Amino acid sequence: MSIENKSGCADKESICAQAALLGEMLAQSSEYSQYQEAKTELEGDQERSRMLSLLRQQQMVLRLAEILGLISKDAEDDLEQMYATFCLEPIVCSFLYAEGRLGRLLSEVQQICVGKLDLWSDNDMFESMQYGEVNKELN
């Protein structure tokens, strides 16, 4: 399959077809297989599923508080303690481990894709400016 059209550029259809193939490869990966097994086991245990849901809710509350500038050290400590406690549960721990492995794989794929692109960033503008120019822009 050619990824270039008549103008020499990859077309959307070809890009999406390649993405579908990548998705199939990811679905066949050991990371995804391990994730699916851990997820099935977790779903079969209502109490442990509820524990993980509670942990996720606490994480969302903490992230929202962080965004709003309302974060407290106690809240972070409480979440860490909850996470440590829940990780003592083998089913929850196994799921979190598998989820982390799959997440890292997906992150690596994303970094590879983005690394091939020259995307604009606010940081690009500030890195190219002298400190005085930045200060002038802000005032």
Image: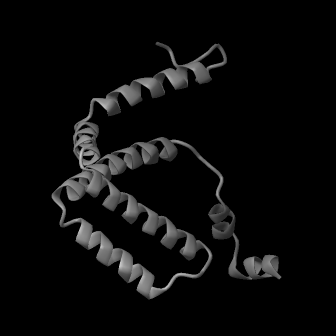
Q: Please identify the quadrant where the C terminus is shown.
A: bottom right
Nearer-the-camera pick, 102 or 5: 102
Relative vertical location of residue 27 with respect to residue 57 in this rendering, above or below: above
Tell me, yes or no, if residue 36 can be seen here.
Answer: yes
Relative vertical location of residue 139 with respect to residue 87 in this rendering, above or below: below
Relative vertical location of residue 13 with respect to residue 137 in this rendering, above or below: above
Relative vertical location of residue 5 with respect to residue 93 in this rendering, above or below: above
Q: Which residue shows up at 22% across the image and 37% down it?
A: 30
Left/right of residue 1 with respect to residue 66 in the rendered view: left
Residue 35 position, x and y percent, is: 27, 43
Q: Residue furthest right?
A: 139
Nearer-the-camera pick, 136 or 59: 59
Nearer-the-camera pick, 133 or 35: 35
Q: Which residue shows up at 50% across the image and 14% down it?
A: 2
Q: Which residue shows up at 26% across the image and 56% down it?
A: 48
Quarter of the view holding residue 9: top right
Residue 101 position, x and y percent, is: 28, 50
Q: How is the image coloured?
A: one colour
Question: Number of callouts in the render?
Answer: 0
Q: Residue furthest front?
A: 46
Q: Which residue shows up at 20% across the image and 54% down it?
A: 91
Tell me, yes or no, if residue 11 can be seen here.
Answer: no
Nearer-the-camera pick, 50 or 13: 50
Residue 102 position, x and y percent, is: 32, 46
Residue 15 position, x and y percent, is: 53, 25
Quarter of the view holding residue 123: bottom right
Left/right of residue 67 with respect to residue 31 in the rendered view: right
Left/right of residue 136 with respect to residue 106 in the rendered view: right
